[in-house]
């Protein structure tokens, strides 16, 4: 599933490519993935693009908003009228150019460019909402780790509301920290040298600070390298992200610990998710 760095990467690329464009038409091949009346946004201009947690928010000139959630296998691919983006490259893992059988929603713009919403497992969605509905959706999430409201005090308080639970699943709770998922929660625990299944009630002030610092360090770096293409994620251009090469524990089972402690990266199930860690240096 694309997490904050991947969705932020797409958001920034969308801002460069579609902000200011006018929607000409929407082709909906899978109606169950689209919520709202398409006629409400046809002919409207895209005025701004933001992100809330793992959701892309596209503001329109009539005070409507398009919410896009990629979920497990969703992709957004932009193709201009010259075919210079996305359409000229195979899209992993399907090895198909767009459009293809997984291109369930296609947004056409008046300048001839198109935005393809692909999703092999069909868990993702696009919704049309008004400003009140947007606020309601936004309030479900905790602080943005890239924002000014993400402080060590708020972070610690949010974690301690779940003090009898293991740390990694709580880091993935979107009401605690917006946008973190399985990959970056595992990486943060490793950076902080905290075992992923350790109960929050056992953490010291130094542990909380180390976790906070790890999140603040990892996410901007992951965005710089355009995220992790562990499964289906690609950038708006249909390219893979480069941060996979920088991962220290995720998907590194059996490899020597990068901290050079003499241990090896192990994997176990925690709250139903594969979890990577070093049993020797994470305590």
Image: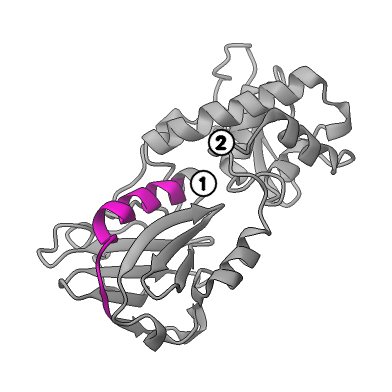
Q: Position of residue 156 (x, y in %)?
A: 77, 33
Determine the CA span between mark 1 and mark 2.
Answer: 16 Å
Q: Indicate whether 252 appears above or below 56.
A: above
Image quadrant in which the C terminus is located? top right
> Closer to the camera, 219 or 181?
219
Q: Which residues are magenta?
A: 6-24
Q: Nearer the viewer, residue 218 or 56?
A: 56
Q: Is residue 257 rendered magenta in the image?
A: no
Residue for badge 2: 250
**Quick check: is 7 in the magenta stretch?**
yes
Where 86 sits versus 28, above or below? Answer: above
Residue 84 position by quadrant: bottom left
Q: Residue at x 44, y 47 (%)?
A: 8
Count of marks overlaid on the render: 2
Q: Residue furthest left?
A: 82
Q: Is residue 184 visible?
A: yes
Q: Sequence-wise, which precedes: disc 1 or disc 2?
A: 1
Q: Residue furthest top?
A: 261
Q: Nearer the viewer, residue 70 or 233?
A: 70
Secondary structure under the numbered disc 2 in the rendered image = loop
Q: Is residue 261 above or below residue 217?
A: above
The kind of secondary structure element at disc 1 is: helix
**Camera-side mark, 1 or 2:** 1
In the image, residue 205 above or below residue 145: above
Q: Residue at x 36, y 42 (%)?
A: 241
**Residue 172 location (% of width, % of height):** 67, 46
**Residue that numbered label 1 is attached to:** 4
Residue at left 53%, top 26%?
A: 217
Pinpoint residue 201: horizontal percent, then vertical percent: 88, 32
């Amino acid at each position: 599933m694309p997490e904050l760095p991947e969705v932020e990467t797409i958001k920034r690329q969308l801002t460069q490519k579609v902000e200011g464009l006018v929607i000409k038409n929407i082709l909906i091949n899978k109606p169950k993935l689209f919520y709202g009346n398409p006629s409400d946004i046809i002919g409207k201009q895209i005025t701004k693009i933001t992100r809330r947690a793992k959701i892309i928010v596209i503001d329109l000139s009539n005070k409507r908003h398009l919410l896009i959630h990629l979920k497990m296998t969703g992709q957004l691919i932009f193709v201009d009228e010259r075919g210079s983006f996305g359409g000229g490259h195979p899209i992993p893992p399907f090895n198909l150019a767009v459009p293809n059988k997984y291109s369930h929603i296609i947004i056409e713009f008046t300048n001839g460019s198109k935005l393809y919403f692909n999703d092999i497992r069909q868990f993702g969605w696009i919704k049309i909402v008004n400003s009140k509905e947007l606020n309601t959706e936004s309030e479900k999430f905790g602080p943005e780790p890239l924002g000014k409201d993400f402080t060590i005090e708020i972070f610690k308080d949010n974690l301690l509301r779940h003090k009898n639970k293991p740390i990694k699943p709580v880091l993935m709770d979107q009401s605690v920290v917006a946008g973190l998922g399985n990959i970056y929660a595992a990486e943060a625990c490793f950076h902080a040298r905290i075992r992923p299944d350790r109960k929050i009630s056992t953490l010291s002030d130094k542990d909380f600070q180390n976790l906070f610092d790890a999140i603040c360090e990892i996410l901007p770096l992951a965005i710089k390298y355009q995220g992790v293409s562990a499964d289906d994620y690609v950038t708006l251009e249909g390219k893979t992200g480069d941060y996979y090469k920088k991962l220290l524990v995720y998907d590194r089972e059996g490899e020597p610990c990068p901290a050079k402690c003499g241990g090896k990266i192990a994997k176990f199930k925690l709250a139903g998710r594969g979890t990577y860690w070093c049993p020797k240096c994470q305590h």
